[in-house]
Image (spheres, rainbow, N blue to C red):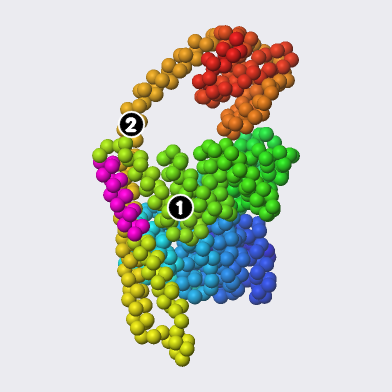
Amino acid sequence: MRQDLRDFIDSHAQSRGNFQQFALMLPTDDAELDALIAEPLQTYDKSAMAFTILGALGTNRKVDARHIEGIILMTAEVNFLENIFFKLHGDVPKYLLAVMRRAEFGHTFEVYALFLMALWNFEGRGEIERKEIIGRARILMRTIEATRDGSGLVLSLPYLLKDDVLREICEERFGVTPEEKTKELIQARLKICNQTSFEVAVEEPQHKVATGRTMHRAVARVGRNEPCPCGSGKKYKHCCIEADNLRLQKSSSVPGRTHRESLQDAERFLTPTRVEHTSLIELIVYDPTKIPKDTLKPYFIRLAVFRLFEKAADSLEKLGFSPELEDSWDAVILLANRSGRYDIVHRLVQMRKDPDVVEKDIWFGFRLANADKDPAKFIEILDGHTTLAVTENTINGLHGITSALLNSKLKALGILLARGVIPLDPLKEAKALYQEVVRARDLLALPPDDIDSDIMDERLRQESAKDPDSLREAQEKLGNKAKEVRELKESLHQLQREIEIREKREKPADAPANVIPLMDERALAELRDKVETLKSDLKDRHNERNELRRELEKTQTDLEELRQKAEVPDHADHDKASEDKEADLLMPEETLGQQPVRLIEFPKKFEERLASLPRHVARNTMKTLGELASGEPSAFVGVVRLKACPATMRQRIGSDFRLLFRLFADRVQVVDLINRRDLDRRIKTLV
């Protein structure tokens, strides 16, 4: 960047007049201007980005739409997005959607982004990825709070996108919005979007410290009448106060540093607490090799939460995989898989020293994602796991496969499988699986209320048969309403099919191609009127059914809470009795003193035993054994001998599992890993 431009940015606050003055300094050549705009986006210089972008757009200079990715990563401010969206040159929705796939910006930003993309298409400016945008809008509509900033824009999305399902969700959550009110809102936002960049900018520089997160002053506090710290001998108000006020507006979370300065050697100031408040752009800038080891885990979790999967994968590859990073690796691969980032899943598996072994050990959903680019391997894994699930014939296996498919590219197959699993699942798991089905249907832009909904209603009806009269009455109402909905759906389908047949009916040979006989035309008009009436009735029944379902679920939740309160003492007594019974089998805890380093000796088929247990139990077991073998003193806390066979010792693995082992001079001999309920029976076999 030219020095005169750099000096101007450093010495001037962001305001209308300063943007106009800076615009006059911009290069006249479009290629030079494009290179100038790209520079602060590459160096993450927020102030320089604002001056160059707004200065160029304010004078109607060409700013390519591809730059929006860097702009949004640096400052996901909805006002800035509104200002530039319709002024950029090119396919703006394409690049905006691309950056939204790369990172998570929160509900407020997503509302504005979806609104602007829908408005772009509504005004005929260009095509958009309708399926993806409608899917995102549906999911957002189900979760956003009415009090959140920008929630009013959500109400306009059904009108702009012309999606009936989105309209139903909107009316169910927020009520009916008059069309005139929606049009007024759209026109008001469009007026703001069409203002020039200079009109939107503040007229006078703002004299306040930067806001948004926990900030620290970039300038020490000095009284106006005190001597200036620069040593000039003048009073502060007659010397450096203006320059310091400008610097103060660029304060950051690091004391004594501006935002730009805080990005230089930023890792030195990073702590586990501070990383929880870091911004998206700071996470991108950090060099993982310079981050303190105790901060790496929260750093990777923060990356995964922001869905910065490329940065997370780059950082893990840069550091190299190690056991200390396994929790971080798990967090990233879990969220990457759920977000459909199969390229990241594959990279994470390949970075391990034994990717083939790891690939066989990880969850089915990750294996599918890892084989996303290899159709033959994809089918092999799918066939292998489905065959295993059918062979084992357990509901847990079927549930796991269904959930994995609902989060894979085979969402439609997952929806079909769910129809067989939901009736078999325990009610709590069935509800959770049904929510995954709804999410998958949203992402596929399918109607959410289908056979899955009927199955779920039937489960609720069966469950209510053993509950009080009030619950049964609510369920009966829901059952009747579900029947009405099914009958209306069938009638609507038959009418639509009849219209289709009539429209294709052979016309007289001498009739023009675009002319329908008068009698058929009247009949078709009547049928279409009936279809519209049925659609309206079906919509009303859907809303009534959803309301009854919510009432029923609330009643069930209230009853379940009452049951749990009544059962708490019984569970407490049961747990206490179980603890007392286990204590009778054990000798008092003893001090084992300093322990040597030992090797671990495993029994036969112990690997299969670990594989049959939840992953966190298996991991905790191996961690405990490693610490026992290394002589770590903390690992021997809680170790006790069995009364019936004192050579065998017991250590807790979580609340429900027990590790049995023997200590020899040179080795730790693993005896077994069992559920605590089986301890008495296992001791008898040892004796």
Q: Residue at x 57, y 32 (%)?
A: 614
Q: Which residue is mark 2?
A: 563
Q: Residue at x 53, y 73 (%)?
A: 126
Q: Residue at x 68, y 72 (%)?
A: 31
| Residue 452, x across and y down, in percent | 43, 51
| Residue 433, x across and y down, in percent | 47, 45
Regarding mark 2 in the picture, which secondary structure is present there?
A: helix
Q: Residue at x 61, y 70 (%)?
A: 64
Q: Which residues are magenta?
A: 470-487
Q: Is residue 12 visible?
A: no
Look at the picture and state if 521 lies above or below 112: below
Q: Is residue 645 visible?
A: yes
What is the number of the mark on residue 438? 1
What is the number of the mark on residue 231? none
Q: In this image, 668 relative to 424: left or right?
A: right
Regarding mark 1 in the picture, which secondary structure is present there?
A: helix
Q: Amino acid at mark 2?
A: Arg
The magenta stretch spans residue 484: yes
